[in-house]
Amino acid sequence: MRILKQQFSVEAYPLSLTKTILLTLLVTFCVVLVTMYTFLHYQGYAFLDTISEQILNAKKENIERTINNYISVPQQSNAIVVHAISKEESSTLSVRELTGLLVNNINNVFSERDYLDMVEFGRPNGDFIGVSHDRLQDHYLALRDAGTANKLTFYSDFSLDSAVDKVIPDYEPQKREWYNVVKEDRRSHWTRPFRDYDDAQTAGIAWSSPAFDRNGDFAGVVASELHFAELNNNLRQFKPFPESILLIVNDKNELVATSLPELAKTMFKGGNDNLSLQTLEQTGVSEVVAASQALEQQKAPGMLSISVKGKPYYVDTFAVQDQEAKLHWKGVIISPTTAITSTILGYGQAMILVLFVVCGLGVLTVGIVLLRATRPLQEIARKADELVTHRWTPSRHKRHFPEIASLETTFMALSQKLAESFELQRKKLEEDDITGLWTRAGLQQQPSLYKRRNMVGLIQISNMYSIVNALGTEFGDAFISEFIARLRDLLPTDTLIARDTTDKLLVIFPGMNQHKDYLRYRSALASLFMGDTHEQHMAEKKYVYTGNVGMLLETLTEENFSDIRRGVGMALLQAEALGNGAVMLFSQEMYEHELYNIKLHEQLNDAICKHEFHLVLQPIIDQENEARCSEGECLLRWHSETLGDISPVQFIPLAEESGLIVPLGKWVIEEACRELAAMIARGAPQDFLLHINVSAIQLLQQDFAWHLMDSVRMNGLVNGNICIEITESVLMQDMQRISKMLGYLRRHGVSVSLDDFGSGFSSLSYLHALPFDSIKIDRNFVKGVVGDEKAQSVINSLIVLASGFNVPLIAEGIEDEGMKLKLRELGCNKGQGYYFRRPAEFSTFHCKDGEFYYQPQETTEEADA
């Protein structure tokens, strides 16, 4: 450890950590004091002005937000009442029924908004209801309808059962300001200032909204009132400083509300119908008058400074608007500058004093604490070397700071945990906790792995994931453990077994093995998947395993282990293709095949763009009329610039696996339609039927039918020119969806042919529900039609089947005249193959006057001669 420290030594500062921190605190404190003094000496007044303006702006924004929220309450209240009335029938609407709604609105919905003073509703027939309360909780209910003899009756509480306080016989809501302003144009408005009919004759304004019933008929007017007296009380709370004056004026510069109590008493004059307001200059308050004159002369928005009787003031304004921006009032704030500066200076002096005291105590305290803290830290640093050996010696000091004590105990525990953690991590990486086997990483650490061993096997239990998903991990653990027990019984005792992945096991056979040993082990390993259950393993459960094995013969070394693992993986893939229980030995051909597939896949991506694909045509001949041909199959060919001619058997599965079959299939359809259209234009029959092979992936695309018929239409063809060929394996994908798709295509004139019939799925159960127009016999049956009675029996059965469905049977792979004649004798009259014509490009076929000549043109001319 000391040697490592010398190698990684770090240059240290000349001062200790304690001295550095104390010195830094002292210097910082002195710099702060000098900076503050210098700043206040040279920029004090400008600083105070800036801070004052910022404080006032911040307070103004808060006041503006509060007052605007206050002003918007009547609109929110009206919206609730209007919404409730819109669900009623006007002809049956009684104002008494709205009592609960209005009381809930003013008592509960806006219970914390004392400034909502009254909510009322008047009908065109004169019926009226209103509820009111104030901050002293003096509340009442006012009602006028037939039940009160059409007299406005005031109740002492919100209940109609409470005592009647007052009755006004001649009250008509239609004549009130809040009703008239809406009745004319049926739109919401703010009223002009007015006085209430209550005993206090309170002045205020109201937000009036028309109410319509469920049929859209006018039901009356809803109004929510704000009383100026309540607004004045709130302004006294909202003003930024005790000495400030807060005013609200309307768009005519008339005073609406004020925070000055003496001004509030005289600001309104007149009765209910002729209430008048004062302008700011009419108030007689010198500060207000001066502020009004300054604002009238203001050219740009912003804060103003004025002087009244030698005393400086700040004047600022803000907009007072409701939610619907129909109220255009203005707020005016008048604040003496001394109210702000005295506050700032007082806070500043107190802050400086506190700063002195805190800094002094802080330096002293930090010094003491640092001395107590750094000594144990230095001791811990000296003992840190012990962590390497997982030992930690307790400190000599009895007491420590909690952090130091925690650090000390943490290092003690850490030294123990490190040893445990390293061991657990090693086991996790190198041992499988379920089976007790080595993992691949653990296997590579075993010295015996590279001692005279040259045969490796990779076993995959293919139904492992299905077992776990269906029966749970506990059953899966028992499942794999039982398999390993059976495997151990089959192999020599010194065989190394490791769990490669969840469903794969690596087996390293002992000794230097030969090919005959591989054959012996192959049979043993294959028996694990053949359904044999050894008697010694018959317990409460019987496990059935499916899987495959890949094997490789090559001497194991540390350098080639990864290559060998890849090799047995390739062999395993080849074994999977052969079915359950297959075992394959790795060969160089497998590696070359994988490389070729990789190259093929890379080339396949660019083949369409490089125009490396082309189509050929093979005629389908009706033996009853061989002279005339009007049907053929379109086949895809690929000539790669780098790989040469590639068989469809090789590239079609790759295209399906990678998803490239979708764009490739679209290209085939488009190109086939183009080629057929060109051939018809040269003279081929108008009803020529072109067969196009389609995969299951293509058929299940949502736009398949649209693309096919659109390609037909764009090339001037008809749907009857196209027949799509599908193999039986297509039907295994999604029988219901495919059946619907084929039915849709046939209804639109597209033919359907079952290709390679009898080669795969081969179940008669789907034929009765599947729409198709012809059946093509797999070439493997056609190949043995001459001399093979079984093949002839199969073809006879298919002919009867096709006859029962009333569709033609087409034989593929007719290569000589004997095959042709035998098929015709059996009753199969349609066929294709090399005997008639090898697949060739569309342009090589001779077409003239509605006839298609499938033989080369020279032959046709000689026959004519």
Image (cartoon, rainbow, N blue to C red):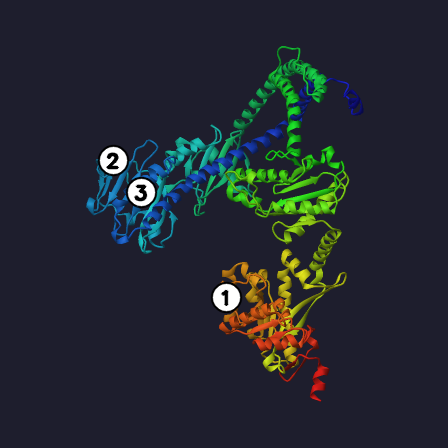
Q: Earlier in the sequence, mark 1 or mark 2?
A: 2
- Work out whether residue 424 or residue 148 is closer to the camera in this orientation and state it: 424
For residue 156, which numbered disc appears in the image? Answer: 2
Q: Which of marks 1 and 2 is in front?
A: 1
Q: Quadrant of the N terminus?
A: top right
| Image position, residue 115 (x, y; %) | 38, 37
Q: Earlier in the sequence, mark 1 or mark 3?
A: 3
Decide if residue 23 is in sight here. Answer: no
Judged from the image, the secondary structure of the residue bearing numbered disc 2 is loop
Decide if residue 437 is in sight here. Answer: yes
- Horizontal side, residue 37 vs residue 757: left or right: right
C-alpha gap between disc 1 and disc 2:
89 Å
C-alpha gap between disc 1 and disc 3:
71 Å
**Vertical position of residue 622 compared to residue 85: above or below:** below
**Vertical position of residue 213 compared to residue 782: above or below:** above
Which class describes the residues within 10 Å of circle 2: few (<14), some (14-19), or many (20+)? some
Query: Amino acid under label 3?
Result: Leu
- Horizontal side, residue 517 vs residue 208: left or right: right
Quarter of the image for residue 503 reads top right
| Image position, residue 851 (x, y; %) | 63, 83
- Work out whether residue 775 or residue 368 is closer to the camera in this orientation and state it: 775
| Image position, residue 646 (x, y; %) | 72, 63
Judged from the image, the secondary structure of the residue bearing numbered disc 3 is helix
Query: Amino acid under label 1?
Result: Leu
Label 3 sits on residue: 101
